Structure formats: structure tokens, C-alpha cells
Amino acid sequence: MSVSRLLFHKRKILMAKTTNIGNIFRSIKNSKYLELFPDFRKEKAQRSASLFLSLIALSFLGLFAINPTLSTIAKLRKELADNKFVDQKLQEKINNLSALQQKYSLMQTDVPVVLDSIPQDPEVPLLLGQIQSIAKNSNVTFNNLQSFQVEAVSSSTNQNKYSSFSFSASLQGSYNDLIKFLSTLVNMQRVISIETISINKKGDQAGVLQIDILGKAYFKK
């Protein structure tokens, strides 16, 4: 057998085998092809269902878990802001009270002086004794010292919160001593006012002057 006839014979056999394979696949029904591959539509449906269920689960999670948590966080933030505001106000009050306490401590020694400047009662004998002591320290001599009757003033007819009484004094001494007496008198702790004052020579005594004073002392009602 020649080579060409041999090749022709093999080609014929190969074509016959290919035709037989094609006939075999054509003999299989179309529905059988689907059985040979995975059910993609079913898998797609399962994935869609899983995604839908996941979305529902997340919605319930947000409704029953996340939303209350966010509400709690917002409430806590508001309470924190309110507490900070209250703490700030309390701190301001504490600072103010501390400043007042410091000022009171500085003024504490002055309080008795202020209270004694206008006493609750007339305290006439005490005032006359203080005037006599000032005169002695100033080296002047009393000719006369007296107080006048304290008049009772009704609070319904007088809007002032204090009352007063008058006193008079007649003294003699040198010019410098009388000036010292007057300066000490008007600067004494108790509040008084000088209504009238007169200075005259004392007879024929050289360098000796006489001073007559009419004053007023105050006290609380």
C-alpha cells in the first residue's frame, strides 16, 4: 500500500470517529445539558435571599440596639454639659465667697471701730468722760461741760435711722493747746459734729484763751 493511500485511509477513520462523537452529543436531550452544570439560578436566588435577610437583620439591629445606644449617648452628653455648667457656677460662687471672706478678714479689725463710732445708745456719761480725757491730754482746763436732754424721736415721723443729743463745753488754755484739743475732738472715734465755736481772751491773762463749743453726738435708734 502506498503512503498516500495510507494517509487517506487514516483520515477517513478519524472523520468517522468525529462524526460518531457528534452524533452521541446530538442524541442527548437539551435538558440533559443543564444536569451536567451547577444550578446557577438556584445559587443566585440563595445569595439574594441571604443578602435580603442580612439587610433585615441590620435594620432590626439598628432599631433595637444602635438607636437606644445613640439616644443614651446623646442623653449622657447633655447631662455632661449640664454638669459642667453647674460646676462652673458653683466654682464662681466659691471664688466669690472666698473673696468676701478675705475682705471680711481684712475688715474684721475695723468692725468694732465702725460700730463704736455710732453706738446703739446715747452713752452720754461715756462721751463726757472721753471729752474730759482729751482736754487733760491737751493741757486745757474746763470751765464748764454739760449735755442736754436726749429727745425721743418717733421713727414714724423721722426717716433717719439715727438720733442725737447736744452738749456744750467751755475751756481755757493756750492757742496751741486749744487747737490740739479741737483737732483731737473732731477726730475721736465717736461721730460728733461741732455746731458753733467761739474763742475769746481770758481776762487779763496773757496767752490764755477761752473757747466755747456747742456740739452734737449721734447714736442709733
Image (cartoon, helix red, strand yellow):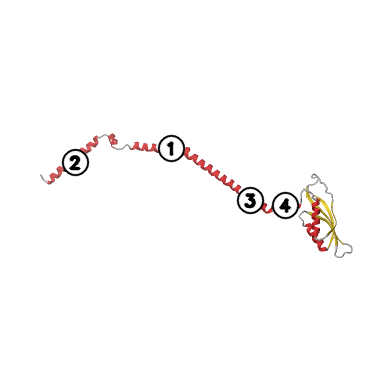
Q: Quadrant of the N terminus?
A: top left
* Secondary structure at numbered mark 1: helix
Write down the quadrant of residue 56 in the picture: top left
Q: From the image, state whether disc 1 or disc 2 is nearer to you.
A: 1
**Viewer-nearest residue: 26 or 90:** 90
Q: Picture coordinates of residue 116 (x, y %)?
A: 75, 52
Who comes first in sequence, dot 3 or dot 2?
A: 2
* Classed neighbour count for the residue bearing mark 3: other residues with Cα under 10 Å, few (<14), some (14–19), many (≥20): few
How far apart in space, not on screen, are marks 1 and 3 (Cα)? 59 Å
- Residue beneath label 1, please? 57
| Closer to viewer: mark 3 or mark 2 | 3
> N-terminal of the two: label 1 or label 3?
1
Viewer-side residue, 218 vs 46: 218
Q: Circle 2 sits in a helix, a strand or a loop, which is it?
A: helix
Q: Which residue is mark 2?
A: 15
Residue receiving disc 4 = 112
Distance from disc 4 to disc 3, alpha carbons, whole Å, reads: 22 Å
Is 9 above or below relative to 182?
Answer: above
Q: Which residue is mark 3?
A: 98
Q: Is residue 17 visible?
A: yes
In terms of depth relative to the viewer, which is nearer, 62 or 204? 204
Front tag of 4 and 1? 4
Local packing at callout 1 (Cα closer than 10 Å; few below 14, some 14-19, many 20+) is few
Residue 13 vs 94, above or below: the answer is above
Where residue 118 sits in the image (x, y, percent)? 76, 51
Q: Amino acid at mark 2?
A: Met
Q: Position of residue 3 (x, y in %)?
A: 12, 46
Q: Tell me how far mark 4 sits from mark 1, CA to CA.
A: 80 Å
Q: Nearer the viewer, mark 1 or mark 3?
A: 3
Are the residues tagged 4 and 2 within 8 Å (C-beta)? no
Disc 4 versus disc 2: distance between alpha carbons? 136 Å
